[in-house]
Amino acid sequence: MSSILNIKNVNKNFGKISVLNDININIDKGDFLVLVGPSGCGKSTLLNCIAGLEKINSGDIFIDNKNMSDIAPKDRDIAMVFQSYALYPTMTVEKNITFGMKVRGLSDEIQQKKLIEVSRQLQIETLLKRKPGQLSGGQRQRVAMGRALVRNPKLFLFDEPLSNLDAKLRVEMRTEIKRLHYDLGASMVYVTHDQIEAMTLATKIVVMKNGFIQQIGTPEEIYNHPANIFVADFMGSPAMNLIHAQTKKEKDNYKINIKLANGEVASLTEKRKLKLPKDIIIGIRPENITENGSKNKQNAQVITSNVDIVEPAGSDTYVVTKLGETEVTARFHSETKVKIGSKIDFLLDLEKASYFNPSSGKRI
Amino acid sequence: MINSVGKNQLNKIILRIFLYLILSVFVIYYLLPLFVMITTSLKSLEEIRTGSLIALPRNITFEAWGTAWSTACTGIRCEGLKPFFWNSIFIAIPAVIISTLIGAINGYVIAQWRFKGANIIFALMLFGCFIPFQVILLPMARVLGLIDLAGSISGLIFVHVIYGIGFTTLFFRNYYVSIPVELVKAAKIDGATFLRIFWSIFLPLSLPITVVTVIWQFTQIWNDFLFGVSFSEAGTQPITVALNNIVNSTTGVKEYNVDMAAAIIAAMPTLLVYIFAGKYFIRGLTAGSVKG
Ligand SMILES: Nc1ncnc2c1ncn2[C@@H]1O[C@H](COP(=O)(O)OP(=O)(O)OP(=O)(O)O)[C@@H](O)[C@H]1O
Ligand SMILES: [Mg+2]
């Protein structure tokens, strides 16, 4: 596979504030790269740097193996969809979509042909004569998308294109973008701070924090093998449980001791071949803590603890208890009969657990 | 219970009446001079001398208006306001157009292409708005002499453009600041140049603020007296200066009706501008951000 976007050692600062620190990302043709991270971590800035709308202070950006440092945004063969859509307010939908082609001097025939093609694809044919102010949020989003699609660029850049939509429309448009990516086979860089969007759309995820990359990987890697506590906590909803524990080396495995709410200590066994320090943080997702029932997994181990909260969430019920002095969420069946205050058995699937170093936060 | 409700109601009505009474007094206070001007201009000299100031004219005559327009004496010339009216038009229209255009481009650059030092330049321009007319008289006279525009219509246009840029820039900058920067970014990616973005995207958005700026500039320039009197010669004086000369050049009797008609003629264009564009003026002043 050939590289479509290669970002090498990129740094960016606004005055004294450094916003991007030593960013290195490489994606192949057809990849769907999602940038996630909390607000202000530099996602939009990185996207603007790729587009050439912001100058980088050091490093190189290659698009299709061509160094972009001296190339203007219009010549980078990219298209961008902005968070606010940035539709030209005085132009009709049609003019919005064809403006770029007109500026580039394409013939009217080609403009019309592309306009029809794209508006059919996005189902906005009936809106072409309207102004952006007369459109709903979802329709504006589509038009912004259309403006990008007519360019037929090497690389699409999306800056939180769905964040202004309501929940239902978001899910719809998410599916649509996924289909678009599939149909076009296009390469995309997509910014979001919604981690569900990231998981569902990406072929590759970059998690950022304060201008530093925390982890790059497939959604599966990020979800199951987070590189550090930040990633573990940020990706997934409800978040991964992070439980303080002590380890004790035995012959060929570790005993893992977790303090219970009543002061007693529960002891579990880690059978994988690992090398653990004395103090650790266990990262375990809610779905790997389940109710003690008939279909128990083989390696599951039991901890008995008090039920503090029961939160029905439709298809599942979340049960909260206290382990290692933190609140821990478990995912139970929706038909569960557990009551607040009762003492029950929780099943922990330690095979799926991650371990982190409490002082550095890094994965072990 | 019922009694107190009724009492409340009554209080309200009395308050209302009182309010309207006060407002009416102010309206009369404001409009009385205009009323006197109009009625006086429609009377004959004879009637002015014998009648009361606020009486309606018995025989309406437009003679004074004709005199004011074409035969009244301004100093030694007796051609009325007509030539000076045109002078003012030839000064005001180009000056308004040029200063508005420059202001629009300045505002666009300062608000949307934030280059290094943009804030300082803007601050200096703002400062320019607060420089009193009197302060720039001498330096400006010198500059006009140097560039050979002294005493000409072009010179006056130049002065008004320079003095107006601070205001027009301020207006447009404040308007464009509320337009999201992403619009420029999108257009850059679409391949549009600096001027193309201004022309195709920003100018079409600018009707409200353009109206505000045009009204402001037109009123300022049309009503200007000090620049007009300082930087013009006999043939290039604007209407305000001519009006002053008509009123001051007394040959025998004071023709109040002619003076009044002349004053109304001089004020007419700004009045008309307000009447026809006033609606946009209010709208433009309150216009906020643009929804994409
Ligand atoms: N033009 C600018 N001048 C100075 N600082 C800036 C500028 N643009 C962004 N920043 C700063 O850079 C940091 C990163 O901003 P950026 O917009 O990239 O964040 P983001 O990850 O996109 O956040 P969000 O999710 O809220 O959109 C922020 O701390 C922001 O304050
Ligand atoms: Mg952002």
Image (spheres, coloured by chain):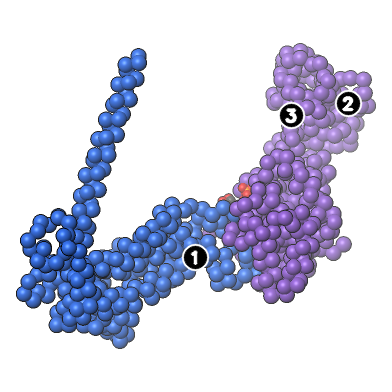
Q: What amino acid does circle 2 point to? A: Ala
Of the residues shown, which amino acid type is indicated by label 1?
Tyr
Q: Chain of mark 2?
A: A
Quarter where residue A283 is shown: top right
In the displayed structure, does residue A10 sit left or right of residue B71?
Answer: right
Q: Secondary structure at mark 1?
A: helix
Question: Residue A136: x, y in percent?
Answer: 65, 48
Task: Give the SS element for disc 3.
Answer: strand
| Residue under label 3 | A243
Q: Position of residue A262 (x, y in %)?
A: 72, 15
Residue at (61, 62) in percent of width and height: A91
- Residue type for callout 3: Ile
According to the image, label 2 marks what residue?
A300
Q: CA distance from mark 2 to mark 3?
A: 17 Å
Residue to which mark 1 is pinned: B108
**Rendering colour (chain A):** purple
